[in-house]
Amino acid sequence: MTTAALPRVPGDRDPRVSPLRRVTGSPALRLVGKRLLMAIPIMLGVTILTFWVLSLIPGNAAQQLLGAEASPEDVAQLEEQLGLNESGVSRYLSWLGNALHGDLGNSLVSRQPVSEILADRLPVTGELVLLAFVVSLLLAIPVALLAAHKPNGLMDRISMMISTLGLSVANYVLALLLVLVFAVTLGWLPAIGYVPLSDGLWANLKTMILPSAAIGLPLFCFYTRFLRGDLVDQLQQEEYVTTARAKGVGSWQVLLRHAFRNSSFGLITVVGLNLGALIGGTVIIEQIFALPGVGQMLLQAINTRDFVVVQAAVVIFALVAVLANLVVDLMYAVLDPRIRYGSR
Amino acid sequence: MRRTLKLAPLVAAAMVLAACGGGDDGGSTDGGGAAAAGEPTAGGEVTVLEDAAFAGSWPAGLDPATNTTGGSNIAINQAIFGGLFLLKADDDGSNAEVTPNQAESYEFSDDGLTFTVKLRDGIQFSDGTPLDAEAVKFNWDRDLSNPCTCKPSWPLAPNGVSVVDPLTVQLQFTRPYAAILASFPASNVNWIASPTALQKAGPDAFAITPVGAGPFTVVSNQLSSSVVLEKNPNYFKEGLPYLDKLTFQSIGGDQPAYQALQAGQAQAYEGLNTTPLLQQAQKNDQLQVTVQPATSPYVIQLNTAIAPFNDAKAREAIYRATDFEAINKGIFGGIYDVSQSFTGPGGKFYEPTVEGYPEYDLDKAKQLVKEVGGITIRLGTISNYVATQINTALQTQWQEAGIKVEINDYQLAGVIQEFTGGKWQAMLQTAGAWDPAAGVGVGFRFHSGVPYSGVNDPALDKLLDDAAATLDEGQRADLYKQAGELIAKNAYAPFGLAFAPANLAVQGVHGPGLTTKIPPILVNAGVIWDEVWREQ
């Protein structure tokens, strides 16, 4: 009997397919490729939109830098120095041409290469976002599970109260309150400033705890409420829960192994969608805590109408959003084996 | 006054948090910080916070010639470059005078057409090269050929900058210009950079790490974020500066700055202008509060080129309907002075009252409004706490007189657009400077040829031009008095609160301009950084 005569079972590798084809033909890889291709028009759209919106704001970099006291001659001279006397379309196309070759250009205002500015500032914002994101999620999941375990119980009511409170306070007010309590009154943590990770983990974390809490706490509240609501729905309405209970599965097991697994889809979607807001939150928070990150840079660049720097920041943010959504889609497949992207 | 973005919500938050801002209630140390200072001691470090919307923004770097926001960054410039001249005053802000610093002396020619500066011998930049007349000429030529908010508007003759000898540099003018001396302390021509270091590093790198002959040298500079300085070992004054290290840190507004001081992360903050926080700080015995003597009063500019303010009666109606004393008491607790002219109590040629000034008279205002057949106007201002509060109060007061008012506040670009569009009707702005002819002086708001003026009056132009040209201080005072009276007589623009921001410093930090009063040339006082010290 030859192997060719044997019937193939699902999951067996077809020996006629080359290893390379197997890799490129992988549904997950096809999804990644498709999404990255889709990112091209998205990024183009985002940069065109940003450029257009910036051109709608009154004043240009020269006028902003020189202020109300400047003479028209000084403004005209600076416009020429900065190349602002060229048409908007030509400036955008020139920027795009350079960006496609990996050159994000030099800041209109400081003349520093944007890549150098980003290299200085991205680690700060990256750490801030990561800490806020991880901590909010790590806290939200157990609290939501505890709350959903006994709906309307003590834990549920406490978590509901904290969540409502947290969602009602704007992050900049929360930031000032956190500073008031933990920096001014208790003196435990610094109110402003940034210490790089290279100067020591604890020294670095001390400067990041309050800013990431200011961004992360409202997120924690949102995630908690969302997950708790979804879990309770699952527990009260889904038949598989009833079945599991009928089989004598314990309440914690039902919650953790069944309801939570299903609810995590919604949570992942919400987390992906929230990433934009999370990054947006850094703009004000970095300003309050004097953190030298991308948010602070973006705000300054908008104020000075430094479109080269604004574009670079927007490209980074848009890329993060696209990648985050891709990761979310891939996680669906990991969590639910029934989902197979691109399978026929 | 140049103000860019202000985080408006932060102001609201500041109001909320001001009441719970911590700190002990103690006696106010308003302006009295230096009284108990004692003998200065050397050593230590100080971190100074600067508002990101103003002095804490240096996006174009710190090369005096290309720092387009140099007029806002006086503190940092003074720390790195020192200055040819400095504005100094007694501790209470009186007897303010522009005094030679890196310059040894100055001289006007009798006809006022020549200004000669003699430099101190032996001053070196921190790179070891000499600060001499050639270096000064090199810097001035660069300064005058680059646009900057801090560029002086000298009536310079062609090739008007010349080196007389290695320590003497001379300026030639096309017309007498006595106001030049007062223009120095807040302008880029005052900050001399090392030509050798500039040529060696190239302009872009030099703007990040500039080299001067001031009390401190640059260790690191992250634009509009923080600049770290250390003591200049080559500094020309024996025993100075006192501090080993000085850091300027940009911060997002008054409230975070106030809390950072309380938390001990910084030792000083320049330019506090949120009044509730100022009142809170005055009760906090951890802090010294120094409200600088005001030099630039608010003015309600009226556009006399278009209706309704092309009619003198409509302008007088605004004067008669405006009660700045009530605004001062009701909103600001009476902490500011009210001026009737373009000078404030800290400025030169201050006249608290002006003869013929149309004072508040509600009945007269109502009658005038009736006579002109009603007034409906738009009143604008730049977005900041004090200005928007004043405009809201003015709207209420004017409505009592039957004037219908729509108020708007703008970011800087919006204000510029309003002025250059020429359709604005009334605009709350600041006018004047320590010397009315220097910086954003009175001419900026009242001279016919300026796009930000609402007045076109050759008689007023002549008075202002003559006052800027005249060497005799008594004559200048008289000319400005006449200008004030002419503005009042024609009801061109009512003046209001003479506002100046305050400096905060924690106990144990002392220094001229920081814990003593020095009138602001433009907005913030020029702190004498080499004399700032911290109790050890």
Image (cartoon, coloured by chain):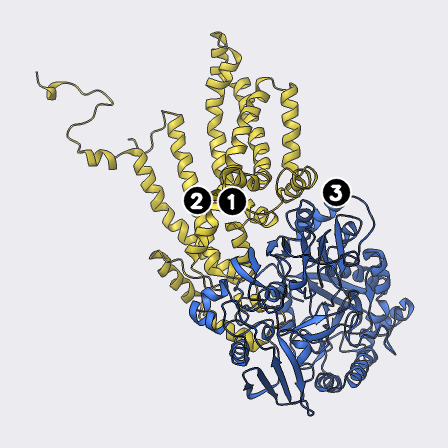
Chain colours: A yellow, B blue
Task: Name the side, left or right, on which B477 lies relative to A77.
Answer: right
Horizontal and vertical percent position of residue B362: 89, 67
Horizontal and vertical percent position of residue A5: 11, 19
From this view, report whether residue A281 is shown above or below residue B406: above
Q: In front: B260, or B515?
A: B515
Amino acid type indicated by mark 3: Gly
**Which comes before the other along the chain, label 2 or label 1?**
1
* 3 vs 2, front mark: 3
Q: Is residue A85 visible?
A: no
What residue sits right under mark 3 in the picture? B22
* 1 vs 3, front mark: 3
What residue sits right under mark 1 in the picture? A279
- In three-dimensional space, the C-alpha distance between marks 2 and 1, rounded to whole angstroms, equals 9 Å
The residue shown at (58%, 83%) is: B168
Check if mark 2's residue and mark 1's residue have beta carbons within 8 Å. Answer: yes
Horizontal and vertical percent position of residue B415: 64, 66
Q: Chain of mark 1?
A: A
Check if mark 3's residue and mark 2's residue have beta carbons within 8 Å. Answer: no
| Element marked by disc 2 | helix
Q: Are marks 3 and 2 in one subunit?
A: no
What residue sits right under mark 2 in the picture? A320
Q: Are marks 2 and 1 in one subunit?
A: yes
